[in-house]
Amino acid sequence: MVGVQRAVAGSLVALVGLLTGLSAVAGLAPPAWGVGLACGLVLACAVARGVVRGGGDRVGPADLVTLARATITCAVAALVTESSPRHAGFLVALAAVALVLDAVDGRVARATRTQTWFGARFDGEADAFLILVLSVHVAPSYGVWVLAIGVARYAFWTAGWVFPWFRRRLPSRPWCRLVAGVQGVVLVVAAAHVLPDALTYAALGVALTLLAESFGRDVVWLARHRRDPLVDLPARVEAGRLPA
């Protein structure tokens, strides 16, 4: 376990180092630095606030993996700001590393028995952030409709301010995690331009369809249980499960 202040400080130092390295090999303009650092500061504040709200002051080993993944995504956001062809390879490589780490943090949490509500929430938000950043990068090449993949999670979150029952914790469904993974993989493939355009359009369409099905099923569940008292929720509902 590591103190949260030390963890977020390390994240910011790592981000500065990553941006410095990218500047040296590919060149980053001041706006890209600004976006990357702004994302890093928001990430640091969000993590510190989330840990404190969860009643702790330390983060576990799985949280550190997720924090590394989110830090890498901040660097990806900086690269997306410039959308230069010379940055494409670095962007795809960093996004691929983030996707690999996404498969690691859950295993680490289970292996170390350090699953927490904050960890589950942080993992979901890190997924959503990477998907948003990649969709912003891919949309100019394949159409503005691709942004729907990236903003879906945030639209769902916004709906919670209008309909309080949207904020109810959802049952854990492995299908949701699989769908979230599909979004990331498809967007990275689209960003790499390794497939013919027709296949990439088809893959993006399938990814969006799966995402709509997953969110739709969550909305139906929430609507059916909107009048249930929180204390009567079934035991299968897990703390921190987020819709994919």
Image: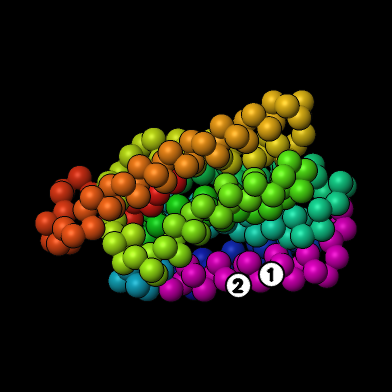
Q: Please say whether residue 112 is visible from this viewpoint.
A: no
Residue placed under numbered mark 1 in the picture: 37
Report the Cα–Cα distance between label 2 and label 1. Answer: 6 Å
The number of callouts visible is 2
Rate crowding at label 2 as few (under 14), some (14 to 19) or many (20 or more) other CA atoms within 10 Å.
Answer: some
Amino acid at circle 1: Leu
Q: Which of 145 and 3 is in front in this view?
A: 145
Where is mark 2, residue-wise? Answer: 41
Q: Is residue 166 above or below residue 44?
A: above
Tell me which residue sits at (81%, 53%) in the image: 83
Residue 45, percent from left and from top: 52, 73
Task: Please report the residue visible at 48 percent of the width from the left and 36 percent of the height from the top.
Answer: 210
- Magenta region: 22-49
Residue drawn 23% across the image and 58% down it? 226
Residue 121, position as x, y percentages in the image: 40, 57
User: x, y (%) of residue 163?
Assistant: 34, 65
Quick check: 231 left or right of 217?
A: left
Mark 2 is on which residue type?
Leu
Relative to residue 161, is residue 169 drawn left or right?
Answer: left
- Is residue 58 a member of the stretch shown in magenta? no
Towards the viewer: 243 or 5: 243
Q: Residue at x 31, y 66 (%)?
A: 164
